[in-house]
Image (spheres, grey):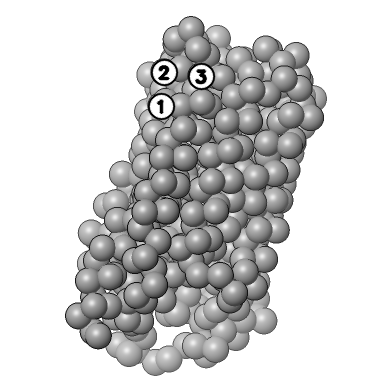
Amino acid sequence: MRGVARRASLLLLPVIYLGFVSLGLPDGTMGVAWPRMHRDLALPVGLAGVLMLWVTMLAAFSGFSSGAVLRRVKTGPVVLISCLLTGTALLMLAEARSIVWLLLAAVPLGLGAGSVDTALNGYVARHYTGRHMNWLHACWGIGATCGPLLMTRALASESGWRGGYWVIGSIQLVLAAIFLCTLSLWSSQPELVRDKSADVASGPVPTMPANSEAGWLSGVIFLIYVATEMTLGLWASTILVESRGVAPTVAGLCATAYYGSITGGRIAVGFFVDRMGGRRLVSLGLALSSVGAVLFLLAPTPLLAACALVLAGLGFAPIYPCLMHEVPRRFAPEAVFTVIGRQSGFSYIGGAVFPAAAGWVAGQWTPGTIAWLIPVGVALMAAAIIRLNRLT
């Protein structure tokens, strides 16, 4: 039985990775497509923030509801249905004719994303080691890099953003077919795995409760992090096109470089986190992202803007997984799941509210004003993490 479980875990691992690729695939496409999309549909430029708010709130609802769903339905079918939902949503976006159509397409897109996120994170946390968790999030980055790249290529062709969404939606449906063919792998549950890298046996067991300053501050840090990362990812291309006169295809490549650097950074985290330590990597990430944020604000050329986005992406890469990995070292054992759940909840709030608020800023002033918000976000995050380190 143990041999069967081990084979199942090895065979299932690439399927799980593909699940997170599918999760990331649509994430950066709206930011690349929007400069053309809002003109073609005669919509205000700031409306992208409202759409992001709607999608993210639906994903939050789906994520918070997934626990009850997963108690009744196995992870495999949830992943399959989620991928079908997102694939269908992307094909709906390809045929969008009005704001109503966009809002309707956002429903399956948000519900599908929230379900697969919760299902796969929970499954990997229970059955695989921390290294695989880091690489799981790197697979999200692969999808988030390929999506904008495919959209950029479509923008340079006659098919435009509609053709881009057709291609990406079709890829999602192909991935759904793969999940359908591998459903039987989920029936043989792999063994529960204890991640030794998360042990606190080398020192005293932490006693910090969840309902403490540190417990709430930890959630606020995730709110700031996701707000800053998603705001830059959504609006970087529009800032370059609308405020700096960069061609849409070049701006799309810059946005692709941003997501690519997050992916590369998270792959590297899987190799070095055990030797360097999570806190040191987070400090290095804050330094790099600070430089990248300021350089993007001041960059006079597309090349410097691309370099700035790469630095920011590399800096952001270790922050989310390393802070998540540090929870058992900071908090009492009985508080760990409460804090992690709080971090996830605050992440959804940050991703839902702040990119939309940035859209309001763009509508009131110019998209270029959003670039000022990124260094502010990094500075607030650094101050909060320094405080958390002192408390724990």
Residues under labels 3 and 1: Cα distance?
A: 13 Å
Residue 163's disc number: 3
Compared to 203, does 185 lie above or below?
above
Report the mark closest to the observer, 2 or 3. Answer: 3
Residue 108's disc number: none
- Asked whether residue 247 appears in the rendered view, the answer is yes
> What residue is shown at x 64% (from left), y 73% (from top)?
68
Residue 358 or residue 33, whichever sits in front: 33
Residues under labels 2 and 3: Cα distance?
A: 10 Å
Residue on which disc 2 sits = 153
The reply to whether callout 2 and callout 3 are in contact (CB within 8 Å) is: no
Kindly state the secondary structure of the residue where label 1 is placed. Answer: helix
Name the spot of residue 106 as percent of width and height, x first. 68, 39
> What residue is shown at x 36% (from left), y 85% (from top)?
200
Residue on which disc 1 sits = 149
Residue 59 or residue 198, whichever sits in front: 59
Is residue 114 toward the left or the right of residue 289 in the image? right
